[in-house]
Amino acid sequence: SVTPFVEFEANWIPPNDGHRCIIARTPLFLDTSVNPTLVELSDSNNMAQSNYTQYIAAAASPARRGIAEVTLNNPFHERALIYVMPQIRGPFAEYYRVYLEHASLTLDPGASAKVKVMLESMFGDPKFGGDKRWPEKFFHEPARVSLVGYGVNLNNPAHPTLLGGVQVDVSSARSTEFTKFGWDSKEGVVRGQVWVMSPSGPAPGSVLLTFHGPDETADNTAVVPLDSTGTFVFTDGLEWVRKFRSREITGHYPGRPGYGPADAERPLTV
């Protein structure tokens, strides 16, 4: 037998932080080239899902904690004890901390409850890492935090059941911010500057300027390079405003290894 293969491509610009999910579904397969009546037995397994969560711990004092939630669910017909088992992996895992609001909960049949998870990097805390010379590799290799759920049926406690889990990639970076972000309506120019907080200096890389309008796509976003002073100038503003019928412009610095992302504090009105 031959397994059909379809290649699919789409533009996706997710935010740097937070949880995102990609789901792919296919309809019931019908092979009309061989036999019009030859179909799949079931389409109940024609779905694939990938969950993505990324958190970047930016240098600050005190260190900033990323806070998320995981949902615990009791799939049994009886009350059960549901555990969350955290694990941290990676060459720099020792420099990250994981805090759980609860390690376990007793839930009624079919009940669910949310548990807070807090993630923290020692890189952002001068008390632990301020004087440490961090290797460049530290910023390129995130620590992988796995949260695995187990259920223990209280009527059969000797046989815990694996229920599922999630994975969070945690990276460390220097904190950045937009120190300037402005619009010159006469010249049609967007100007700004992105600065690294500690150690103080210009941010490298590029910024993303999004000209918001009806029927937005990835084409509404311009990639503008930063110069050696962390400054950017976009001179085609009026053309983009007319093209996308924009009323608002937002600025985003996506960061790069070692440098955290940042958003301009307020959008520009045009």
Image: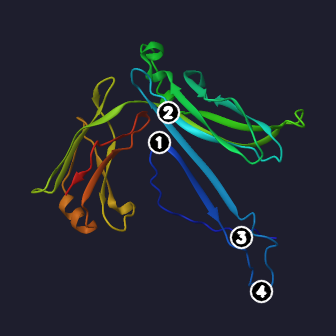
Kindly identify the amino acid type of the residue bearing the numbered disc 4: Pro
Image quarter of residue 159: top right
In the image, taking residue 82 as reference, residue 223 lies left or right, namely: left
Outermost residue toward the left in this view: 186
Which color scheme did the rendering employ for the protein? rainbow
Q: Is residue 231 visible?
A: no
Where residue 40 is drawn, which disc sits there? none
| Cβ–Cβ under 8 Å for marks 2 and 4 | no
Mark 1 vs mark 3, CA separation in Å:
35 Å
Specify which label sits upstream in the sequence, 4 or 1: 1
Q: Earlier in the sequence, mark 4 or mark 3?
A: 3
Mark 2 and mark 1: Cα distance apart in space: 9 Å
- The N terminus is located in which quarter? bottom right
Question: Which three-letter amino acid code belongs to the residue tagged 2?
Answer: Gly
Numbered circle sitting on residue 17: 1
Figure disc tally: 4
Residue bearing mark 2: 66
Residue 193 x %, y %: 23, 39
Q: Which residue appears at 71% of the width and 31% of the height?
A: 104
Category of crowding for the residue at label 4, using alpha-carbon neighbours closer than 10 angstroms: few (below 14), some (14–19), many (at least 20): few
- Residue named by callout 3: 4
Q: CA distance from mark 4 to mark 3?
A: 16 Å
Is tag 2's residue or tag 4's residue first in the polypeptide sequence? 4
SS category of the residue bearing label 2: strand
Judging depth in this view, the residue of 225 and 93 nearest the camera is 93
| Circle nearer the viewer, 4 or 3 | 4
Q: Nearer the viewer, mark 4 or mark 1?
A: 1
- The residue under label 4 is 36
The reply to whether dot 2 and dot 1 touch (C-beta < 8 Å) is yes
